[in-house]
Amino acid sequence: MEKITELLQPYISLSEFIQIFISCISLAIALVALYQSKKSIQLTEKSILSANRPYVMIYIETLDTVYFEKYIVIKNFGKSAARVLDLTFTSKLDKKNDIYQLGSLVGGIIAPNQKFTTSMDPHFNETVIGEIKYQDLDGIIYEEKLNIKTDMSSQLRWSNIRNSKDTDEVTAIKQASQNIVKAFK
């Protein structure tokens, strides 16, 4: 009878089983916490990199002073410098820019908030398609596809108000001042 009682006794007591179970739950919670911490650190690193990287864009800018002007603008909207590695256009630019295709910018560095502009034929209204490849100071390379709609302002209206008592010089000064104020709005 004693041998049967010994065989029926559990190998571990109930309190030992509870301790092992609680230890397993604690280990599982610790592993989940470590995983969450790792994911949080990765997300924070990604956010910091994204917030501080260069963002080089090409767009069309128009000025309406005494006459209408259109410019191609390349600007770094980011918070770090960018070295332009390559700039290619698969569509034609206007006559003024199609010869060199802004090639002088390749190899140059664009500082944060710095922009380069080139005059454009105001009657050129084609969509410009291309790609810009640039690199940040840490060596990370970015590529942006360009789809520049050059006729965005073609249906926008501007006025040329002139007071009959004003000379040509006064009118030009007023319009230039108005354009400066508009640019800073």
Image (spheres, rainbow, N blue to C red):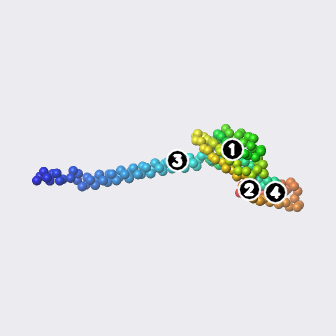
Residue at the extreme left of the image, as rendered? 1
Is 105 left or right of 30, judged from the image as shown? right
What SS does tag 4 mark? Answer: helix
Distance from disc 1 to disc 3, alpha carbons, whole Å, reads 34 Å
Q: CA distance from mark 3 to mark 4?
A: 49 Å
CA neighbours of label 2 inside 10 A, class few (<14), some (14 to 19), many (20+): some
| For residue 163, side relative to residue 128 (left or right) | right
Amino acid type at mark 1? Phe
**Residue corresponding to mark 1:** 89
| Residue identifier under label 2 | 153
Q: Disc 4 versus disc 2: distance between alpha carbons?
A: 22 Å
Circle 1 or circle 3, nearest the eye: 1
| Residue depth check, mark 3 versus mark 4: number of the one nearer the observer | 3
Query: Which residue type does callout 2 highlight?
Result: Ser
Secondary structure of residue under mark 1: strand
Q: Amino acid at mark 3?
A: Glu
Visible in this render: residue 76? no
**Residue situated in front as seen by the camera: 98 or 46:** 98
Quadrant holding the C terminus: bottom right
The residue that disc 4 covers is: 174
Which label's residue is closer to the chain start, 4 or 2? Answer: 2
In three-dimensional space, the C-alpha distance between marks 1 and 4, rounded to whole angstroms, equals 38 Å
Determine whether label 2 and label 1 are within 8 Å by CB: no
Residue 83, percent from left and from top: 64, 40
Which of pointers 1 and 4 lies earlier in the amino acid sequence?
1
**Mark 3 lies on residue:** 45
Q: Nearer the viewer, mark 2 or mark 3?
A: 2
N-terminal-most mark, 3 or 4 = 3
Looking at numbered disc 4 in the image, what kind of residue is underneath it?
Lys
